[in-house]
Image (cartoon, rainbow, N blue to C red):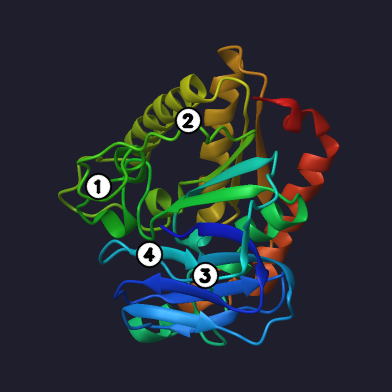
Amino acid sequence: MARELFRAAFKGTELFFRVGAAHEILHVVIDERPPVVLADPQAGVYRISGLQNKEHSVGLFVATESQAAPNHFGGFGIAAGETALTPAKRSRQIEFIGDSHTVGYGNTSQKHECSNDEVWATTDNTQAFGPLTASHFHADYEVIAFSGRGIVRNYNGFAGDTLPSLYPYVLFDKKQEVIDPAWKPQLIVIALGTNDFSTPLNPGEKWKTREELHSDYEAAYLRFLQSLRVKNPAAWIVLWGTDMAGGEIASEEQRVVDRMKALGDNRIAFIPIERLSFTGCHFHPSLADDRTIGDKLVRFVEAHPAIWQGR
């Protein structure tokens, strides 16, 4: 999972923050300037100095995918005599749910074949379509995405929790559910199906035919969307899908949206995404592809301004 972790504001010339040991790439953004990048930081306290003595905003982002272990952030600090401020409150919230395409897996890579270390180094969620869309609308956002996971079937049928089964929990151990009364997104953007359908069924999998897989996928996706709707009764839910797998992904997501609409849900839509270059690691979307997806989402939201009235 990748997401903006913390925002803060202060008046002064230097900033301190503490992080724990983690195999991550962190971006620290001061006043929306190019980020200070910490690749694989050691645990400890970090200092950013030499700032003008004025009001500043700061955001801490995780650029890479967090699978191995939890991240630890010890908070921001300022020097004695400087002033802590309250960050500007944002009224808009967007939640992005998905798989590696939502993570930004290898999106800065210039080649298809990548080692695990190269995937780690070239994955930049801050430049993926989700954060780009949120930035356009000055919205807070969460990215809840896990590479290789699907609705009912993970990539090439490997065993493991699917995304809907992991979604409710803080960590992958599924011991503590997420409870955040302040998180009430007006827009939920989902793309799940690439891992369900991008590979042939293998001997021994529970589905004997694609038709059985389709049926299971549609029923499980419908249940997942209905659970999201219960928690977010006024939000718009937008699904998007590429034309990979001979159009199977897009057609199945469209069928799920049609079933939700048939049940009376009028705040749901599907956006087809076509002709991406997939020049990132292991044929994943590139930075240009992320901009293409983000632009389509932006156009949809701008055509439906009532989205921001939903709470």
Q: CA distance from mark 3 to mark 1?
A: 22 Å
Point out the image quarter for the C terminus. Answer: top right
Residue 184: image location, x then y, percent: 56, 32
**Amino acid on which disc 1 is placed:** Asp
Could you tell me if the residues under marks 1 and 2 are in contact, i.e. CB atoms within 8 Å? no
Mark 1 crowdedness (10 Å alpha carbons): few <14, some 14-19, many ≥20: some
Q: CA distance from mark 1 to mark 4?
A: 30 Å
Q: Earlier in the sequence, mark 1 or mark 2?
A: 1
Q: Earlier in the sequence, mark 3 or mark 4?
A: 4
Q: Quadrant of residue 254?
A: top right
Element on which disc 4 rests: strand
User: What residue is rendered at 33% in x and 58% in y?
Assistant: 155
Position of residue 144 in the picture relative to residue 93 (left or right): left
Precedes in sequence: disc 2 or disc 4: 4
Q: Position of residue 151 (x, y in %)?
A: 37, 41
Q: Are marks 3 and 1 in contact (CB under 8 Å)?
A: no
Q: Seen from this angle, which residue lies furthest top?
A: 264
What is the secondary structure assignment of the residue under circle 1? loop
User: Where is 147 relative to 266, above or below?
Assistant: below
Residue where numbered disc 2 is placed: 181
Dot 3 crowding, Cα within 10 Å, few <14, some 14–19, many 20+ = many
Q: CA distance from mark 3 to mark 4?
A: 33 Å
Q: Secondary structure at mark 3?
A: loop
Pick the residue in front: 115 or 13: 13
Considering every residue shown, the one lying at the far left of the view is 204
